[in-house]
Amino acid sequence: MPCIFELSLASMAHLALDLGNTCIKAGSFSGNKLQEIRSFANINELINEADYVLKHSHVILCSVTDDHLKFIEHFGKEVAHTVFTSQTPIPIKNLYQTSATLGSDRLAASIGAYSLYPNSDVLCIDCGTCIKYNFVNAKNEFLGGAISPGLQMRFKALKHFTNKLPLVEMNESYDKLVGQNTNESILSGVVLGTINEIKGIIEEYQQSYPHIKIVITGGDGNFFAKHLKKNSIFTHPNLVLLGLDQTLNFTLEKK
């Protein structure tokens, strides 16, 4: 039987859920520290892990799909929960002009970046299904950024919108500028093109904000980080989860 101390720790644990387009990432926090990370292929797989969900005292959900509705339908009466939206109190000022259309994952990642570098200009680059550039200035204000297609979306678009181009698999070791066949040409365009897009946008920000911090996150974050060899660039694979937990703590403190 678990001791009382162990039960006390479990009861204070928070669960942050990032319900993305390709998978669900879950982070278990205790005392503001990330204790465990798990990944689920879909919402049904998460629902089947009821013991895991219910060992947490509060859950915060960030969703770019409607899967949070299934979560609430299943667990809503069993565990305290917060759905992260544009109306959720946050520890930074949101100056985005259309906050209702702002992806919750973008804002959560920005809060995570802010928590690492408060009172600093910081650009968070989230490399997932889409590549999202999110900027928080030294006044701790989220201003916005940019969105472009991620690697897999670019490969699929070339196949979908043409009659003869093939769907090419990602090759992380590819580094040739001049593709010598169709597959290599697509790899050169997609892989090297995306790398240079990111480099170019970083350089634009650095010209305007010389002391800016760059934080890269997301499923393809480590791949891109290897090609961006600068001292001012950092990687943090769980920035969205960190931002969600920071928001949950901020929200609970205000109650």
Image (cartoon, rainbow, N blue to C red):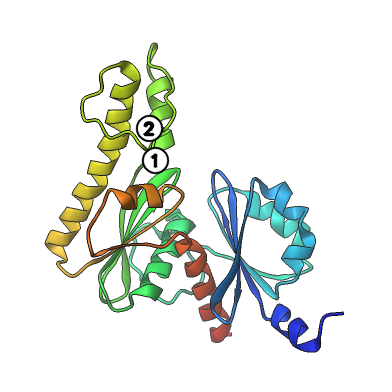
Residue type pointed to by label 1: Gly
- Identified at 42% across, 57% down, the residue is 106
Q: Position of residue 89 (x, y in %)?
A: 49, 74
Asked whether, in this view, residue 29 is left or right of residue 179, the answer is: right
Would residue 142 be seen by someone viewing this image from the given angle?
yes
Disc 1 residue crowd, few under 14, some 14–19, many 20+, Cα 10 Å: some
Q: Can you name the residue that lies furthest to the top here?
A: 164
Q: Locate the N terminus and report the quarter of the image it occupies.
A: bottom right
- Marks 2 and 1, how far apart at CA: 6 Å
Q: Can you name the residue that lies furthest to the left here?
A: 207
Find residue 154 and name its label. 2
Q: Using the image, determine if residue 34 lies above or below residue 158.
A: below
Q: Position of residue 214 (x, y in %)?
A: 28, 62
- Identified at 26% across, 75% down, the residue is 120
Q: Can you name the residue that lies furthest to the bottom here?
A: 5
Asked whether, in this view, residue 220 is left or right of residue 118, the answer is: right
Nearer-the-camera pick, 169 or 254: 169
Circle 1 is placed at which residue position?
Answer: 150
Find residue 3 and name its label. none
Asked whether, in this view, residue 173 is left or right of residue 74, the answer is: left
Residue type pointed to by label 2: Arg
Q: Quadrant of residue 179?
A: top left
Q: Secondary structure at mark 1?
A: loop
Q: Locate the C terminus and report the quarter of the image it occupies.
A: bottom right
Q: Can you name the residue that lies furthest to the right here?
A: 1
